[in-house]
Image: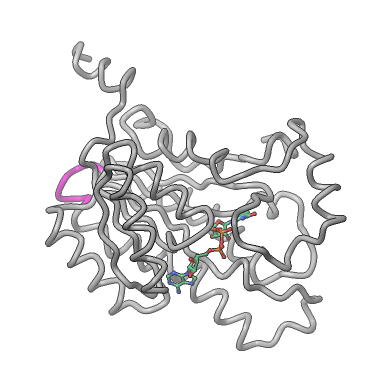
Amino acid sequence: MSDQDLQNIVFPSLKDRVVIITGAGQGIGRVFAKAFGLAGARVVIAERNEEKAASVSAEVMQAGGQALAITTDVSDEASIKQMVELATGEYGGIDVLINNAGIFSTLEMRPFDQIPVAEWEQVLKVNLTGPFLCARAVLPAMRKAKWGRIINIASGAVRLGRPNYLHYIATKSALMGMSLSMARELGPDNITVNAILPGATFTEIERKTVTPEQKVRIVASQSIPRPSVPQDLVGAALFLASEASSFVTGQSLNLDGGVTGS
Ligand SMILES: NC(=O)c1ccc[n+]([C@@H]2O[C@H](COP(=O)([O-])OP(=O)(O)OC[C@H]3O[C@@H](n4cnc5c(N)ncnc54)[C@H](O)[C@@H]3O)[C@@H](O)[C@H]2O)c1
């Protein structure tokens, strides 16, 4: 290992790395976009909601970062293909994919025997097929560069088996297995694949999945007993996207303030 290699690990740079963040129009993805922008990356905001994508892109640029908003539906292969073409056309390659888009804050909580089949299928399509399709779409660029990082945003809820959103839990659980198996296939190409498992993370978006009483219980169950915010996830995302994590792959990292062990 050269001194330069060691330098890249000690001071990993994301400068000009092309980072696609799906679903970055609000919540966790929005904070990721701003963080990667601050780190000097070229951020692609691949979000279904055009207005929100544009607004986050403007926020990143106002803070001095580089960003490109591309209206994208991760459940639509043609839309993903177009997004990847636009991103590579603008920036010349793709280094990092963060599969963050998901049907989450809009989910209705209900016992699994009351989940309409169409809703079950839609959640699978966005939360599971979406990351699969996005990973496939960025692969040629990452293989060409012999470098890549894929980060799947799963959920700490899968470790706890939380009730009343079984479709969601099923997809997030599958993302862990997908990350490990994809890591095995892509290791020889110097592409790492990891999952982040956030605990309950409170964003600017109100949601129905956590009642105020549940929030109190969740916070009390953490080793660090305060509500988690998206900023709590940023350090791990930057690390997994950087050169410093080059030997870390197939892992599922709990970022829940210490609710669960490994
Ligand atoms: N906030 C939490 O407590 C928490 C905990 C664990 C995991 N997560 C996961 O983290 C991710 C982000 O969470 P959040 O709280 O910001 O969620 P959110 O619901 O606030 O935001 C999701 C974003 O994804 C976008 N999106 C939805 N469907 C899309 C599609 N088909 N194509 C492109 N974009 C689409 C939405 O427009 C929205 O901007 C999700 O995958 C979620 O499951 C969140």
In the picture, the quarter occupied by the C terminus is top right
Q: Quadrant of residue 167?
A: bottom right
Q: Decide which of 235, 60 is in the foreground and name it.
A: 60
| Residue 75 left/right relative to 112 | left
Give coordinates of residue 250: x percent, y percent. Answer: 47, 43
Q: Is residue 126 above or below residue 101?
A: below
Residue located at (55% from left, 74% from top): 124
In the picture, the quarter occupied by the N terminus is top left
Q: Which residues fall within the magenta stretch?
A: 142-147
The verdict on residue 196 being magenta is no
Give coordinates of residue 251: x percent, y percent. Answer: 51, 40
The verdict on residue 143 being magenta is yes
| Residue 40 left/right relative to 249 | left
| Residue 205 left/right relative to 213 | left
Q: Is residue 225 above or below residue 170?
A: above
Q: Is residue 109 above or below residue 217?
A: below
| Residue 190 left/right relative to 250 | left
Q: Quadrant of residue 131?
A: bottom left
